[in-house]
Image (cartoon, rainbow, N blue to C red):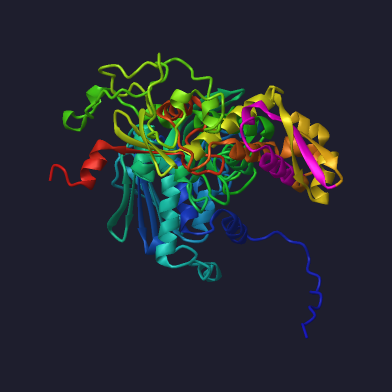
């Protein structure tokens, strides 16, 4: 039986003591040692520091020391620095509405001093010596130090032992402190950062370019598996890098978003970035990115959370659209264009020896491949020339059709980013040779993306054309399928499909999208009807368009175990190089992989 709390006796309203007020404020600002590190590094960067050093003991519980080489604090201002709501960063409401500094609330040092032993040592360029302030006694005395500031915080939460009990192990608190510095390091590649723990160097990031800092903080793999973003959309400028789908992680721990240099956790930015991966990531995989947004300070309110980790945009819709569009554009460009490099950049020992077999060839670089009918035609279609159609007694390589151009005698390495097709493996993979070595392509996954992007383009332009079937394809249908077909005639026509009742228990497919004319009409119709049955028919095109088109594309793509000629394989490679998002299929799987000659040499121990 639960105890019933009796109402407390009424107490008179009175002002709280200053010390208790500061400790309450500290509870909002200082959650753990990492909160102190973040606030002190904010101040160091605001002072114009080019080098910030953080020293910790016991994960920051026993000691947090932050040193910088910034402008310093004048002797007469040191006592003011520890008072609540004392700051040099704002002086009026107008300043508050357009904050351009990392800190501005003027309560961090006072809050930290109320729950720790704090010493403040600083020197400006014009002073003969530095001065040390003890927050406990208020004593101010000369000391030795170069220009800059050192803040020492000892025995955090010593005056509030209940708060100290909620801290985790030293290793956990250290990890949070390092993460706080890492977030600053990503925002300021021009500043050097060093973290020491128990006298040992933990992390060091030297000043450098943005890409160098990304590689130093997140690793070379992040730089190699991400695309650059640089766009200005409306009043928002977005820069940084977005990880390719292959680099996605199971947790959202590598998602860094900055607004005017300040690390934030903002739902608008997070949702916009994730939505840009809709066609590339599936399931619960989380993208990785480091995005920097520059917005007019007057259009963003940073004074909505004591720790300044949340912001509020004046127009969140424009920010959402800008972020989504910038990331989408960066991810949409096929990375196949990066697969080829100039011959001069390849070591002579690893340059491939280009041969000249008489095999089919596709248009020269720069010419757009527009006719891929062969890719979705069945081998027995009359429309496929016999010279390019494989037969039971013919090699999958096929013969060279009369008038078909052949490879030039000495093609330039890298002329085609995904190279020239040389074989088909197990009816599933296309093997191609390019300047770097071997390219392996999952032909169904690649073609599925090509068909999908084509359908999306046609849908956007309201140009999904239908091709009537000479003989309607009938199939036995369930009552649910018949009802769905009757209720969604307009939507089916918009998708280029004509499915009508033939008998009470039979449906007839009378027309299919031209792009998918050579596929199985019955299988396509059943898949689309199943999708329509799961969504609200009145909004299926808007809400489930991509899922519906992806289903259609999957059934329209060339299937595994389909033997392709070299003409067909090369046509697929050329179209991949020009199709947006062609590096991933509709289900988020990669469509191709590159094996360099150096990697192949390592497999066979060449050169050892």
Q: Nearer the viewer, residue 430 or 279?
A: 430
Quadrant of the rendered image containing residue 87: top right
Image location (x, y in percent) of residue 199: 28, 58
Q: Nearer the viewer, residue 479 or 598?
A: 479
Magenta stretch encompasses residue 156: no
Q: Nearer the viewer, residue 400 or 224?
A: 400
Which contiguous range is marked in magenta? 505-532
Residue at image location 68% in from the left, 37% down from the top = 521
Q: Is residue 601 above or below residue 344?
A: below
Residue at image location 80% in from the left, 80% down from the top = 4
Any part of residue 76 in sight: yes
Q: Is residue 233 above or below residue 432?
A: above
Quadrant of the rendered image containing residue 431: top left
Magenta stretch encompasses residue 524: yes
Quadrant of the rendered image containing residue 186: top left
Image location (x, y in percent) of residue 142: 33, 47
Image location (x, y in percent) of residue 152: 39, 54
């Amino acid at each position: 039986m639960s105890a019933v709390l009796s109402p407390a006796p009424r107490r008179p309203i009175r002002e709280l003591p200053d010390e208790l007020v500061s400790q309450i404020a500290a509870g909002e600002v200082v959650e753990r040692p990492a909160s102190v590190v973040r606030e002190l590094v904010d101040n160091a960067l605001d002072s114009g520091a080019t080098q910030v050093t953080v020293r910790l003991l016991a994960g920051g519980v026993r000691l947090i020391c932050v040193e910088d080489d910034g402008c310093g604090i004048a002797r007469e201002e040191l006592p003011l620095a520890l008072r609540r709501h004392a700051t040099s960063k704002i002086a009026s409401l107008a300043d508050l509405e357009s904050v351009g500094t990392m800190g501005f609330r003027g309560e961090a040092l006072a809050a930290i001093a109320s729950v720790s032993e704090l010493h403040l040592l600083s020197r400006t360029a014009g002073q003969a010596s530095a001065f040390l302030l003890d927050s406990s006694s208020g004593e101010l005395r000369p000391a030795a130090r170069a220009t800059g500031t050192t803040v020492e915080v000892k025995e955090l939460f010593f005056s509030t032992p209940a708060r100290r009990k909620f801290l985790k192990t030293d290793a956990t608190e250290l990890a949070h402190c390092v993460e706080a510095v890492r977030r600053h390091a990503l925002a300021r590649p021009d500043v050097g950062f060093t973290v020491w723990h128990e006298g040992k160097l933990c992390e060091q990031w030297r000043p450098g370019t943005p890409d160098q800092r990304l590689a130093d903080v997140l690793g070379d793999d992040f730089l190699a598996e991400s695309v650059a973003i640089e766009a200005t959309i409306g009043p928002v400028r977005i820069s940084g890098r977005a990880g390719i789908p292959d680099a996605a992680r199971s947790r959202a721990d590598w998602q860094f978003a900055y607004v005017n240099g300040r690390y934030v956790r903002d739902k608008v930015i997070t949702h916009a970035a994730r939505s840009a991966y809709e066609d590339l990531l599936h399931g619960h995989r989380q993208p990785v990115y480091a995005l920097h947004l520059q917005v007019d300070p007057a259009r963003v309110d940073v004074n909505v959370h004591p720790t300044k980790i949340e912001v509020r945009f004046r127009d969140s819709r424009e920010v959402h659209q800008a972020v989504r569009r910038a990331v989408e554009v960066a991810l949409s460009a096929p990375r196949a264009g990066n697969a080829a490099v100039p011959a001069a950049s390849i070591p002579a020992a690893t340059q491939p020896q280009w041969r000249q077999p008489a095999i089919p060839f596709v248009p020269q670089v720069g010419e757009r491949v527009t006719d891929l009918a062969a890719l979705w035609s069945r081998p027995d279609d009359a429309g496929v020339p016999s010279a390019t159609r494989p037969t039971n007694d013919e090699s999958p390589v096929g013969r060279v059709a009369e008038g078909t151009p052949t490879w030039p005698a000495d093609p330039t390495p890298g002329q085609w980013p995904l190279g020239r097709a040389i074989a088909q493996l197990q009816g599933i993979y296309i093997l191609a040779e390019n300047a770097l070595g071997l390219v392996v392509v999952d032909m169904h996954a690649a073609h599925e993306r090509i068909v999908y992007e084509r359908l999306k383009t046609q849908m956007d332009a309201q140009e999904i054309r239908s091709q009537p079937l000479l003989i309607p394809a009938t199939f036995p249908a369930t009552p649910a399928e018949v009802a769905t077909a009757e209720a969604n005639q307009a939507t089916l026509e918009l998708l280029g499909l004509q499915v009508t009742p033939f008998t009470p228990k039979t449906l007839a497919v009378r027309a299919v999208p031209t792009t998918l004319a050579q596929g199985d009409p019955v299988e396509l119709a059943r898949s689309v009807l199943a999708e329509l049955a799961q969504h609200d028919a009145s909004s299926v095109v808007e809400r489930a368009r991509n899922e519906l088109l992806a289903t259609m594309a999957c059934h329209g793509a060339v299937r595994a175990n389909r033997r392709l000629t070299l003409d067909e394989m090369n046509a697929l490679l050329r179209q991949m190089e020009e199709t947006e998002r062609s590096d991933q299929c509709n289900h988020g799987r990669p469509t191709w992989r590159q094996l360099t000659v150096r990697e192949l040499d390592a497999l066979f121990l060449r050169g050892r």
